[in-house]
Image: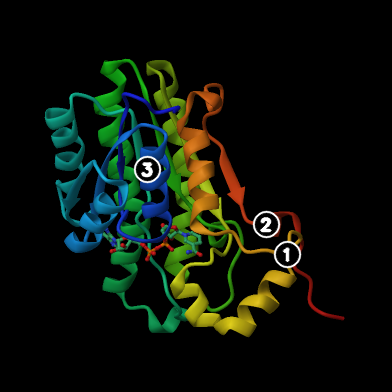
Amino acid sequence: MRFEGKVAVVTGAGSGIGRATALRLASEGALVVVNDLRAQAAEETVRLIGGGEAVAGDVLEPGFVDRLLDGTVERHGRLDVLHNNVGFGGRASFTEVDDATWARGIDGNLGATFRGIRAALRIMGPRGGGVVVNTASMAGVAKVAGVTPYYGTAKAAVIHLTKEAAVEGGPSGVRVNAVVPGSVSTPAFASYLGEAGLARYAAQLPLPRLADPADIAAAVAFLASDDAAAITGVALPVDSGLAALLAQPDA
Ligand SMILES: NC(=O)c1ccc[n+]([C@@H]2O[C@H](COP(=O)([O-])OP(=O)(O)OC[C@H]3O[C@@H](n4cnc5c(N)ncnc54)[C@H](O)[C@@H]3O)[C@@H](O)[C@H]2O)c1
């Protein structure tokens, strides 16, 4: 019960990694404010938890993230943990990405994370501290063939933004870290690769298993907990060893 009496906000918590994190933090005692663009998905997460609060809304909308965090403090009295989790990509080459798609992709993956950190530092700093965990991606460490160029670029910047915020937040007791998932066995990934593709993919990893959303949630919970009291500014891969393996052309 590492989060007994604490209040956490998770963005994009109506599915996948965000939902798993909301469930994990709640199972360890947190009151979780569950944000998602899709109101029904957020409400379903709250139903699965059996408590907390659903707040529907778009982290890309100007002012929304500030309202989300200020409202959390107004209604629940405190803010201890923010998981900046919203992110999206897809498959596209450079020539298929127009200016509006590029701007939206960078804002959705990086700008929303920046606004979350900024609001968290403003709120948590004067209240004695807190923790932010950002969701980056292995696509921000090296190019993933076929994935739209804004995704990895923004996720690389999320890893750096984590260090910027850790240094600025440290003196006021705010820790800021990132999780760096490799490929996660979400329904979207499964339907993209198919069952055989998924098995082939997993077999090539140093640990021959794909991470699932609960594996990522466990790492988020660790970084958000006092067990990580001396850890800030890190980007923790949760990737079955993918980051340890140099991809080489087949000879
Ligand atoms: N799934 C993977 O393999 C993988 C790997 C590395 C990193 N990630 C990252 O993990 C995070 C979560 O991914 P996931 O696979 O769980 O995704 P998901 O699609 O299962 O869930 C994302 C949720 O975010 C919500 N959302 C989307 N845009 C939003 C917005 N503007 N405002 C509020 N909510 C919004 C969606 O409605 C959805 O419920 C993302 O940042 C993603 O880039 C995922």
From the viewer's perspective, is residue 68 above or below residue 135? above
- The answer to whether residue 138 is visible is yes
The three-letter amino acid code for the residue at tag 1 is Pro
Q: Are marks 1 and 3 in contact (CB under 8 Å)?
A: no
Report which residue position mark 2 lands on. Answer: 240
Question: Residue 138: image x %, image y %?
Answer: 57, 58
The secondary structure type at the circle numbered 1 is loop
The answer to whether marks 3 and 2 mark residues whose Cβ atoms lie closer than 8 Å is no
Query: Could you tell me if the residues under marks 2 and 1 are in contact, i.e. CB atoms within 8 Å?
Result: yes
Query: Depth-wise, is mark 1 or mark 3 nearer the camera?
Result: 1
Give neighbour class at mark 3: few <14, some 14-19, many 20+ (Cα, 10 Å).
many
Query: Which residue was labeled with disc 1?
Result: 208
Q: Quadrant of the C terminus?
A: bottom right
Q: Of the residues under marks 3 and 2, which one precedes in the sequence?
A: 3
- What residue is pinned by disc 3? 83
CA gap, disc 1 and disc 3: 28 Å
Amino acid type shown at disc 3: His
| Earlier sequence position, callout 1 versus callout 3 | 3
Q: Please tell me whether mark 3 sits on a helix, a strand or a loop.
A: strand
